[in-house]
Image (cartoon, rainbow, N blue to C red):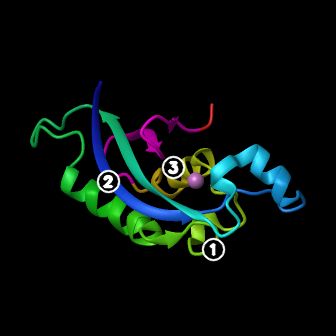
């Protein structure tokens, strides 16, 4: 099995909060990410497709096509946006890395041109990332 990864970056703002908790309680749970007026991150997204190489092209997936797909379905919708309000596929979700990464999976899984979506990694800070490999 071969694993092919495309990396893309985007910058976005968010505020993590649970609606029926006070600002104090939200701050205790979500820290800086619960700043009432939001704050920003530079996110790094990695999309990995698994499969066998096509005998004719030698590719598992055409990275040019994969890049365009990620740009169109994800990056154009999230880059320089407010993840709490601007993004159709995040509506009604608390934009934690966990919720963002599984939502990105759902946006891409049926559209991968060849091979099979294997994992999506999303890095929010230098030291934290979440990886999603679909439902068990
Ligand atoms: Ni944050």
* Front-lying residue, 60 or 4: 4
**Secondary element at tag 3:** helix
Give the labeled residue for mark 3.
Answer: 105
Residue 101 x/y as whole percent: 53, 48
Q: Label 1's element? A: loop
Residue at 57% over, 66% down = 83
- Residue 75 versus residue 33 in the image, above or below: below
Query: Residue at point 84% right, 62% down?
Result: 19
**Magenta-highlighted residues:** 112-134
Give the answer, above or below, for where 131 lies relative to 124: above
Q: Give the distance between the C-alpha atoms of the residues marked 3 and 1, in whole angstroms.
A: 19 Å
Which residue is identified by label 1? 85
Residue ID for mark 2 = 8
Marks counted in the figure total 3
The quadrant of the picture occupied by the C terminus is: top right
Label 2 or label 1, whichever comes before in sequence order: 2
């Amino acid at each position: 099995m071969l694993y092919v990864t495309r990396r893309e970056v985007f910058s976005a703002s968010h505020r993590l909060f649970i609606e029926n908790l006070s600002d104090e309680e939200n701050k205790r749970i979500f820290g800086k990410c619960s700043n009432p007026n939001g704050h920003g991150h530079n996110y790094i997204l990695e999309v990995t497709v698994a499969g066998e190489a096509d005998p004719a092209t030698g590719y598992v997936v055409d990275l040019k096509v994969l890049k365009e797909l990620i740009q169109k379905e994800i990056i154009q919708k999230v880059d320089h946006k407010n993840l709490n309000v601007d993004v159709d596929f995040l509506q009604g979700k608390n934009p934690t890395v966990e919720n963002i990464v599984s939502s990105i999976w759902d946006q891409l899984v049926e559209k991968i041109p060849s091979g099979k979506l294997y994992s999506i990694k999303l890095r929010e800070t230098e030291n934290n990332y979440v990886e999603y490999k679909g439902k068990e």
